[in-house]
Image (tube, rainbow, N blue to C red):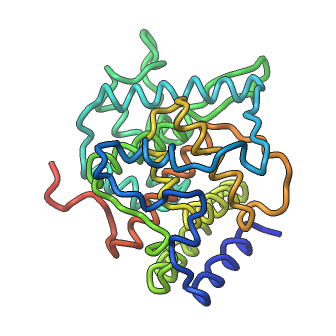
């Protein structure tokens, strides 16, 4: 079954049943209070069910997967080094259609304005013409010309996390919100149009992760707020993959690249946040 059908069926079901969040977000303490002084991440991780999730999670160990993890680490270091990204560029980048040239132009522009923080740029040769660094910026991981990963994909993901942290640190996504009829329909209207501009694989990945975020929004937000490569991230990823059968189908084993999964979850969280707040951007118009 295509991911589009899976997400549409899930949203239709939630609109029909309007089941309370406490029953939908399985796994214990989803709505736990933070009055005990612990961080949201700690509460979310400690609230996970005991034992292994029902789906075995095996990160891929290919050369490509190792390269993707390395590139993803570089992307997060780039964003941390940059500190203050131009909010207007970020706003245009996130508003642009997925995988479109307009998005690549804005990402490329941001990288060129912060070359001191970006690894892998040529030391002696001139930089490639725009929007090269936002279009793909391929990184070779094998001996053949086609064996590359796109650096820009992970740069975009790290910037989405930056926006969520800087401009929406008070974001509260719950199953009550993501299963609200008006919010779910608003999300579907926006994403149905935007997904037409994704490649087939990109569309399927995004629709599946959007479905996962709708089922478990608090866990998904916890994953985005966790440190990349941490135990907290691993446990939350295991929960999201293991308890999202309506999105994934009846499978016994899933092989997933953690870095790639994190990017799609971050983008889906961002898009659900737009629908929840009924705004065009999480970045305020007067942001500086």
Q: Residue at x 32, y 72 (%)?
A: 279
- State the image coordinates of residue 195 (x, y, percent, origin top left): 59, 67
Q: 79 left or right of 267?
A: left
Where is residue 42, by image quadrant? top left
Q: Residue furthest top?
A: 124
- From the viewer's perspective, is residue 56 above or below residue 173? above
- Depth check: give the residue in front, 188 or 10: 10
- Depth check: give the residue in front, 132 or 196: 196
Q: 281 left or right of 8?
A: left
Q: Residue furthest bottom?
A: 16
Where is residue 141, by image quadrant? top right
Q: Residue at x 46, y 45 (%)?
A: 224
> Quadrant where the N terminus lies?
bottom right
Q: Residue at x 63, y 30 (%)?
A: 68
- Depth check: give the residue in front, 64 or 59: 59
- State the image coordinates of residue 177 (x, y, percent, origin top left): 44, 74
- State the image coordinates of residue 18 (x, y, percent, origin top left): 55, 85
Q: 57 left or right of 176?
A: right
Count of numbered tags:
0
Q: 11 left or right of 87?
A: right
Q: Residue furthest front?
A: 36
- Depth check: give the residue in front, 215 or 157: 215
- State the image coordinates of residue 183 (x, y, percent, origin top left): 45, 79
Q: Residue at x 68, y 37 (%)?
A: 257
- From the viewer's perspective, is residue 237 above or below residue 2? above
């Amino acid at each position: 079954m295509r991911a589009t059908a899976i997400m549409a069926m899930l949203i239709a079901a939630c609109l029909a049943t309007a089941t309370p969040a406490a029953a939908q977000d399985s796994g214990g303490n989803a709505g736990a209070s933070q009055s005990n002084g612990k961080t949201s991440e700690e509460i979310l991780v400690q609230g996970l069910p005991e034992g292994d999730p029902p789906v075995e999670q095996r990160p891929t160990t290919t050369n490509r997967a190792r390269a993707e993890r390395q590139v993803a680490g570089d992307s997060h270091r780039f964003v941390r080094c940059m500190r203050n990204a131009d909010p207007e560029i970020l706003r245009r980048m996130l508003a642009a259609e997925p995988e479109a040239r307009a998005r690549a132009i804005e990402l490329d522009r941001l990288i060129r304005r912060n070359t001191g923080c970006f690894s892998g740029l040529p030391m002696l040769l001139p930089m490639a013409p725009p929007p090269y660094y936002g279009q793909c910026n391929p990184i070779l991981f094998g001996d053949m010309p086609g064996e590359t990963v796109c650096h820009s994909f992970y740069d975009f993901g790290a910037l989405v996390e930056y926006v969520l942290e800087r401009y929406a640190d008070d974001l509260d996504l719950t199953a009550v919100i993501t299963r609200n009829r008006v919010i779910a329909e608003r999300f579907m209207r926006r994403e149905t149009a935007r997904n037409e501009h994704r490649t087939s694989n990109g569309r399927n990945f995004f629709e599946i992760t959007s479905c996962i975020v709708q089922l478990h929004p608090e866990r998904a937000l916890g994953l985005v707020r966790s440190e990349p490569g941490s135990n907290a991230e691993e446990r939350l990823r295991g929960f999201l993959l293991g308890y999202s059968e309506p999105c994934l189908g009846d499978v016994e084993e899933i092989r997933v690249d953690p870095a790639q999964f994190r990017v799609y979850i971050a983008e889906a969280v961002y898009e659900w946040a737009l629908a929840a707040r009924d705004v065009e951007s999480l970045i305020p118009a007067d942001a500086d």
